[in-house]
Amino acid sequence: MGKPQPPSLADLRKRASLTQRQVADLLNVTVTTVSAWERGTQVPRLTFAQIEILLDAFGCTIQDLVAATNPQDAEP
């Protein structure tokens, strides 16, 4: 049996009961940007401070966040 798929960025956000608007406001980016990250049409380029904000807001590990923002690097 294979490894389970890592959670997506949208999964992490929804588990934290946050909207795209709330995440956008936390990171000082647009909702369009958050949506593009979640669809995989744009790769997040986050500052260390933004990473810390997401880790706290999502209540996840750095490994989960990296896997969610770099799905092409995750093992199938």
Image (cartoon, helix red, strand yellow):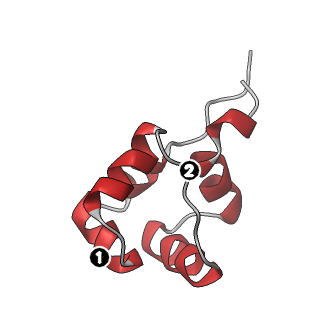
Mark linked to residue 43: 2
Q: Secondary structure at mark 1?
A: helix
Camera-nearest residue between 13 and 29: 29
Disc 2 residue type (three-letter): Val
Q: Quadrant of the C terminus?
A: top right
Q: Quadrant of residue 60?
A: bottom right
| Residue under the image location 59 percent in, 63 percent down | 45
| Residue under the image location 26 percent in, 70 percent down | 22
The vertical placement of 6 against 29, above or below, is above
| Residue under the image location 74 percent in, 15 percent down | 1
Disc 1 residue type (three-letter): Asp
Reading the image, the residue beneath label 1 is 25
Question: How much space separates mark 1 and mark 2, taking CA atoms?
Answer: 18 Å
| Residue under the image location 58 percent in, 50 percent down | 69
What residue occupies the far bottom of the structure in this picture? 49
Camera-nearest residue between 60 and 19: 19
Of badges 1 and 2, nearer the viewer stands 2
The vertical placement of 72 against 64, above or below, is above
The vertical placement of 20 against 29, above or below, is above
- Does any portion of residue 42 appear in the rendered image? yes
Instruction: Measuring from the top left, give residue 11's x and y in whole percent.
Output: 42, 46
**Contact (CB < 8 A) between labels 1 and 2?**
no
Relative horizontal placement of residue 37, taking residue 18 as reference (left or right): right
Instruction: Measuring from the top left, give residue 3's x and y in whole percent.
Output: 72, 27
Q: Residues within 10 Å of mark 1 (few under 14, many from 20)?
A: few
Q: Earlier in the sequence, mark 1 or mark 2?
A: 1
